[in-house]
């Protein structure tokens, strides 16, 4: 299959057309990994000299493809032996059938979501109806959602007086990486991160409208923000939440965040809880 911009773009676009799919680069510039709800279904390397795509697959189908295309398809090159039956690596220099490749991408995606629980599949159905847009701190919809977040926090903790000490650390002009989520053109959620230091990105302003809570959207926002931060070269994500925000604390812990000593401006704020996760 020819290694050119048009073909590479077609493969990338097809991976991202899978419901709920997004791009990550957890291992550096390449491979480009495509995930659904945090699980990889495709790893694409478009470089000349190592023009490959590795795809999740069911063992029987994987074995069949290796038999049909012995010169082009092998067990996942990067996988330990115990995982190799579940992954195939396609040598795109010798494999020429783009339609068949798309079929294998479909099957890789389905092999991942087949393992999801009933609850996760329901959440994926909800997430597939949403659009995730990259923007920055000046975005008007982001501003509106941040205002709603502040109102919700004021109501929860008892008013602006108790929260006034936090406002200086949540200014949007220092935030350049933002995701706003839409359903049918309406903004329903947002999240962002900003640089804390060269290794650490600080997650900020994560908010989901009440009508879209308990759908997995908050967790999906965090996963996508972590993926963006990783692509920008950060090694860790850190965040601050509050003791009264029990649902948020539970979500962050479930995603693998660990409580750490309160950092920076939150060091002397006893109501703050700070967390970290290596990405």
Image: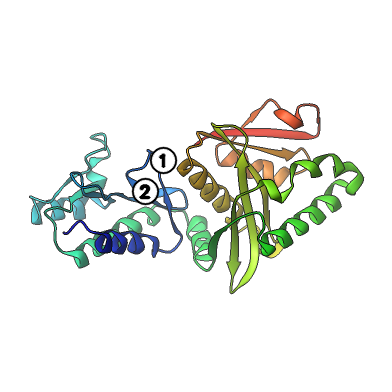
> Which residue corresponds to mark 1?
26
Label 1: how many Cα within 10 Å (few below 14, some 14–19, many 20+): some
**Residue situated furthest bottom in the rendering:** 184
Q: Is residue 221 left or right of residue 149?
A: left
Q: Nearer the viewer, residue 84 or 89?
A: 89
The quadrant in which residue 198 appears is top right
> Which residue corresponds to mark 2?
33
Return the disc, 2 or 1, that comes first in the chain's sequence.
1
Q: Is residue 166 left or right of residue 186?
A: right
Check if mark 2's residue and mark 1's residue have beta carbons within 8 Å: yes
Q: Residue at x 27, y 60 (%)?
A: 5
Quadrant placement of the N terminus: bottom left
Residue 40 drawn at (x, y percent): 38, 48
Q: Nearer the viewer, residue 63 or 28?
A: 28
Q: Residue at x 36, y 48 (%)?
A: 33
Element marked by disc 1: loop
Element marked by disc 2: strand
Tally the numbered discs.
Answer: 2
């Amino acid at each position: 299959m020819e290694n050119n911009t048009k073909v590479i773009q077609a493969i990338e676009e097809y991976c991202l057309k899978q419901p709920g799919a997004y791009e990550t680069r957890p291992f550096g510039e390449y491979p480009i990994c495509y995930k659904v709800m945090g699980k990889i279904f495709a790893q694409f390397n478009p470089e000349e000299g190592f023009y490959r795509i590795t795809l999740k697959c069911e063992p029987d189908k994987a074995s069949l493809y290796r038999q049909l295309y012995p010169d082009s398809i092998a067990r996942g090159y990067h996988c330990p032996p115990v995982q190799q039956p579940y992954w195939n690596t396609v040598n795109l220099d010798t494999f020429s059938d783009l339609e068949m490749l798309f079929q294998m991408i479909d099957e890789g995606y389905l092999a991942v979501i087949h393992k999801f629980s009933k609850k996760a599949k329901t959440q994926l159905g909800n997430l597939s109806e949403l659009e995730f847009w990259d923007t920055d701190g000046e975005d008007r919809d982001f501003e509106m959602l941040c205002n709603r977040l502040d109102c919700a926090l004021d109501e929860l903790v008892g008013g602006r007086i108790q929260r006034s000490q936090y406002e200086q650390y949540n200014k949007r002009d220092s935030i350049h990486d933002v995701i706003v989520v839409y359903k049918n053109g309406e903004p329903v959620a947002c999240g962002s991160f900003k640089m804390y230091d060269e290794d650490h990105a600080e997650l900020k302003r994560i908010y989901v409208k009440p009508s879209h809570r308990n759908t997995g959207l908050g967790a999906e926002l965090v996963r996508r923000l972590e993926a963006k931060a990783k692509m920008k070269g950060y090694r860790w994500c850190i965040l601050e939440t509050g003791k009264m925000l029990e649902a948020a604390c539970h979500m962050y812990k479930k995603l693998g965040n660990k409580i750490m000593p309160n950092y920076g401006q939150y060091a002397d704020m006893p109501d703050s809880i700070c967390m970290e996760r290596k990405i």
